[in-house]
Amino acid sequence: MVPGAEPFEPITVGIAIGAASALTGYLSYPDFYCRFVECCREEQPVNASALKLDLEEKLFGQHLAREVILKALTGFGNNRNPKKPLTLSLHGWAGTGKNFVSQIVAENLHPKGLKSNFVHLFVSTLHFPHEQEIKLYQEQLQKWIRGNVSACARSVFIFDEMDKLHRGLIDAIKPFLDYYEQVDGISYRKAIFIFLSNAGGDLITRMALDFWRAGKKREDIQLKDLESVLSLGVFNNKNSGLWHSGLIDKSLIDYFVPFLPLEYRHVKMCVRAEMKSRGFTIDEEVVTKVADEMTFFPKEEKIYSDKGCKTVQTRLDFY
Ligand SMILES: *[C@@H]1O[C@H](CO)[C@@H](O)[C@H](O)[C@H]1NC(C)=O
Ligand SMILES: *[C@@H]1O[C@H](CO)[C@@H](O)[C@H](O)[C@H]1NC(C)=O
């Protein structure tokens, strides 16, 4: 026996555990610890009803996005052994809810959402501004993703403004998105990658408009109507951030999620939700005023809000 390394007496240990349990109300050690320090809970299932509720209460006019996100995230989050990381590419005009959805996804995986240590947001024009620095950015990005995924397998990476990302940059992360069991000893299979882009917004709007002009309901647009149009459109669009990208080529993107342009009634819903979240009672007069201030297109029919719900918050400050 090594001097000084005497084992603890069983009684002392028993008392210590008893005291700890009494303090914590019989929480297990991780539960206790994770109340104070953010923990990466990579095995925690995704609460499908909470996610569904979030999407229903906060996201308007997006029946396709709602359906895909719910299916993708609960399927992935409750699979203990995914074969590749989850990769979502969200498309649509500004203000249609892409940022919102990525926030909801983040919060349903890590309660602190965008403030979590395990959620990483990259904005093209902010983090990767200079075209001549692409090599450096690629190395940085690989290092960050490697570092963060080794700290938490269920890390979330959000790439905003994909359409402003320099060509080829995104292919640096291709090895992480593939079906490999491990890359240099690290498994990326539980990570989540979300790409946000305006690219394809024109294609989505055209389809929505076709439906509208044919007198069909918006809710009748189906994912299969749009998914292939989108992936092809984005692949062939030089300014999509995914132009001729290996990510599409090799089918590494699991879901293309279309965000439809928002109508007058959806803008009103956004205003009501914003009022509610600020703790005001809903005043329909103000709701109408704010919605009326938005501009709508196309010129003749004026169906869709130019900026979606994007400026609703600042406009509401006025009243
Ligand atoms: C899941 O979410 C619902 C709705 O927010 C909540 O009532 C329920 O307790 C949650 N379930 C678990 C296991 O956390
Ligand atoms: C994780 O990513 C952030 C960028 O969001 C980066 O600053 C940080 O260095 C990364 N952590 C590791 C351990 O690589």
Image (cartoon, rainbow, N blue to C red):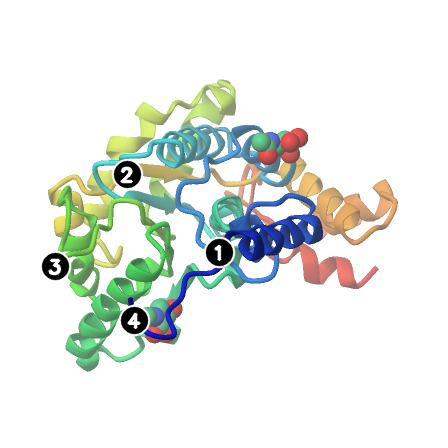
- Which of the four quarters of the rendered structure image does ligand 2 lie in? bottom left
Crowding near pointer 3: few (<14 within 10 Å), some, many (20+)? few
**Depth check: 149 or 54 in front?**
149
> Tag 2: residue type?
Leu
Task: Tell me which residue sits at (46%, 31%) in the image.
Answer: 70
In this view, 65 is above or below 143: above
Tell me which numbered mark, 3 or 2, is placed earlier along the sequence: 3
Crowding near pointer 1: few (<14 within 10 Å), some, many (20+)? some
Return the x and y of residue 26 as percentages of the image width and height. 64, 43
Q: Residue 179 is drawn in which quadrant?
A: top left
Q: Report the mark closest to the observer, 3 or 2.
A: 3
Quarter of the image with the C terminus in it = bottom right
Q: Which mark is residue 184?
A: 3
Measure the C-alpha gap from mark 3 to mark 4. Answer: 38 Å
Q: Can residue 139 be seen from the camera position used here? A: yes
Q: Which mark is residue 2?
A: 4
